[in-house]
Amino acid sequence: MARLRTIKQALLPGAVLVALSAGCSLQKPLPEPQVEEKIDVEVVRSSWPVGRLEAGLAFDPYYADGQIYLADGRGWVKSIEAEQASKRWLRKLDKPLSAGPKVAGEKVFVADRKGGFYALNREDGEPLWEAQLSSEILAEPRMTRGVVIARAGNGRLYGLDAESGERLWMFERSVPPLTLRQRSAPAVSGSSVVVGLEGGRLVALDVTDGSVRWEHTLSEPRGRTELERMRDIAAEPVIDRGAVYAVAYQGELAAVRMATGSSQWSRSVSSFSGFLLDNEEIYLAGTDGRVWSFDRRNGATAWRQEKLEGLSLTRPVAYGDYLVVGDNAGYVNWLRLRDGELMARTRLSSVPIERTPVVTSAEDGLVWVIDSRGRITALRVD
């Protein structure tokens, strides 16, 4: 568990789970759900393209146009061909990284632990420009209308010119005394940026100048201690069909009108890893390891899967008829989309799987999963 050296010390998500469980030991065995395997999952290939991925840093793999982009804490950024898992290019930056890669247009964006923000050429990894921000970047950047949005760990959000790295604007909100180390990536749509803040607030900004369009309280801090009052929006919001969907740790899942910031509906549920918005459903990985399916129109529960309770899960992804989530016991879990039945658990590693799996658009339909040591594995249902 992360040490509370000062009241400002940020907690890793897993550390918060331990702290919330009275008398829980760090050595307590993880749950091992007994599952009757109802589908055959094939390991297609496996390799070690990057180094160890520290918890709390934003190193989700990114897939685009047949390429998987990866980064690690040592400063390596890599592009590999998804079908052959062969290296396309490899770039070593001077400083330990904390976030990325994010592909937008012809650029790949990454950030380091001292506020350095880098744009690389997507074709060969060649550096294009570098900007210096105020502190460590703990969330994936986003880009819209030629503006790159980068979020620093000290509560500042920056708008940078995508071609030059020039700072266009800065937005700032104070950070509560105790927060998760994980930060929510901003969501973008057209000229709007929506960011989930510590303390349970959603803010919509104009991408051209960073001005506030609206603010919405997703979840009010409650409780006697700082730990009880934590309401961080640590998972990325999703903008779709005129609404923003967001979830808070120890708070609510809610739909908010994009035009006005007013509430459509909310449900009491906690998550720091996030959710998948797919057609008319929202699939959410809860803080307690339960997986939920909600109706996106009104928040009504469609199903709930409790067999993974006690595990820390990744954000879910859809793969054919299945919902795929990794867990901190080193398994990939396969749930049937229509009813949440747990169809299989595939053991890949002795270390946690904390990064969101990637589903490629290749004809053979692969799911790529990376563990905390940097080993990446391609899976498919036979």
Image (spheres, rainbow, N blue to C red):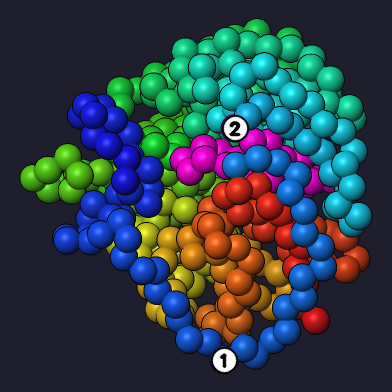
Give left or right: position of 82 versus 147.
Answer: right
In front of the other: 63 or 348: 348
Residue 293 is situated, as x and y percent measured from the top left of the image, at 49, 72
Q: Is residue 154 visible?
A: yes
Q: Residue at x 21, y 27 (%)?
A: 6
Q: Position of residue 376 (x, y in %)?
A: 71, 54
Q: Quadrant of the C terminus?
A: bottom right
Q: Which of pointers 1 and 2 indicates the residue nearer the eye? A: 2
Q: Percent position (x, y) of residue 3?
A: 27, 37
Q: Secondary structure at mark 1?
A: loop
Nearest to N terminus: mark 1 or mark 2: 1
Q: Name the disc covering residue 36, or none.
A: 1
Where is residue 294? Give x, y as percent: 47, 70
Q: Residue furthest left?
A: 224
As for residue 361 lying within the magenta part, the answer is no
The rendered magenta stretch, by its main secondary structure, is classed as loop
Q: Residues within 10 Å of mark 2 (few under 14, many from 20)?
A: many
Residue in view at x 39 percent, y 24 percent: 155
Residue 59, placed above or below residue 372: above
Residue 23 shown left or right of residue 118 in the figure:
left
Disc 1 residue type (three-letter): Glu
The dot on residue 73 is 2
Mark 2: amino acid: Gly
- Magenta stretch: residue 67 in it? yes
Name the residue located 68 percent from the left edge and 36 percent from the top edge.
71
Whether residue 152 sits left or right of residue 359 in the image: it is left
Q: CA distance from mark 1 to mark 2?
A: 38 Å
Q: Nearer the viewer, residue 86 or 173?
A: 86
Residue extent of the magenta highlight: 53-73
